[in-house]
Amino acid sequence: MEPDPGIGPTPDLSLRVSVATLVRVVFNHPLTGERYLALEQKATLHETDHGGVMVVRSQPFGGAIRILDLKAIHALIGDFHFDSPSSRREQDFRIFIQPSSWPVLREFCIQHLSQVDDLILETDPARELVEEFHDTLKIILQPGQYDCLPIATVLENEAAPTTNIHAKGFLTVRLYRIFEAYISDSTLIRAMLQNSMSHNDQDLRQLAWADFQRGGKGRANAVLALPLKQLREWYADMSPEARNTSIVFEQHRLNETVAAMLEG
């Protein structure tokens, strides 16, 4: 019988696990040759008890991997729940488990994330990358426009409260498979730079409000292109604790996952 995972934490299923791919999208500036990092800049309407709050943050391209075989995870750790209806619908690896199951699940994920075309976990970031480039640029990313290689696996083994809107505050451990996608297509590079220069935080807030008023979820996306060397130097001057939080760089709020994908 197919497992039918529920939604949300229980007294037993109290540890949230997030397994994701992060893609370090880089390119060389066509005029200076300087290496740039491209992030996904997102404006999202968060509903609160006091009304709506528009949050603008930039994060790496990528996202939660999909669990392709629920039965395999169920056979390994027994019962688990997804953290939200959307995670359950997409079979995203954002789940609640028994804390005692984490060591065996952690090793299982590390093993399978290193496989090509794995049958249990989605290990190729191409699908997510194509979707997010279409969201931000309205461009369908083609294989010939970039080269993508896996470069590292990053583990956040000590549980910390998540800021994810679907499970805010719940203790979460994380595992990231890091890729680097080098953009070589000059037309795409120009589109990314133009998009980045054309959208500031206020523009995105207005676009997200307009989306909400049209009956949407209140979201807007754009590219944020930043000089990679300066960004690395900024993070290098911080304490390890500060790097693991959301920071402001050149008036842009960056998600805590940005530090996880930078070399060193």
Image (spheres, grey):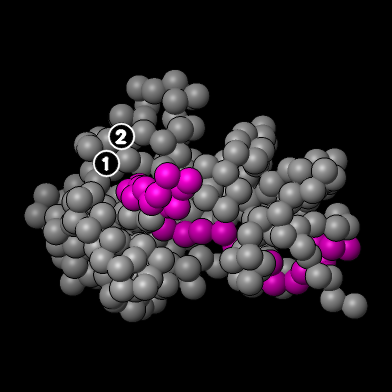
Q: Considering depth in this image, is 170 or 239 the residue closer to the camera?
A: 170
Tell me the number on the disc at residue 123. none
Residue 66 on the magenta segment:
yes
Whether the residues at callouts 2 and 1 have beta carbons within 8 Å, the answer is yes
Residue 253 on the magenta segment:
no
- Counting from the top left corner in percent of width and height, residue 177 is at 56, 53
Q: Is residue 147 visible?
A: no
- Counting from the top left corner in percent of width and height, residue 32 is at 11, 49
Q: Which residues are magenta?
A: 46-75
Q: Residues within 10 Å of mark 2 (few under 14, many from 20)?
A: few
- Counting from the top left corner in percent of width and height, residue 176 is at 57, 49
In the displayed structure image, the side of residue 194 where residue 49 appears, left or right: right
Dot 2 amino acid type: Val
- Counting from the top left corner in percent of width and height, residue 183 is at 30, 63
Q: Which residue is mark 2?
A: 248
Check the image and name the residue furthest to the left.
Answer: 31
Q: Which residue is mark 1?
A: 252
Residue in the picture at 82% in, 43% down: 11
Q: Residues within 10 Å of mark 1 (few under 14, many from 20)?
A: some
Local secondary structure at mark 2: strand
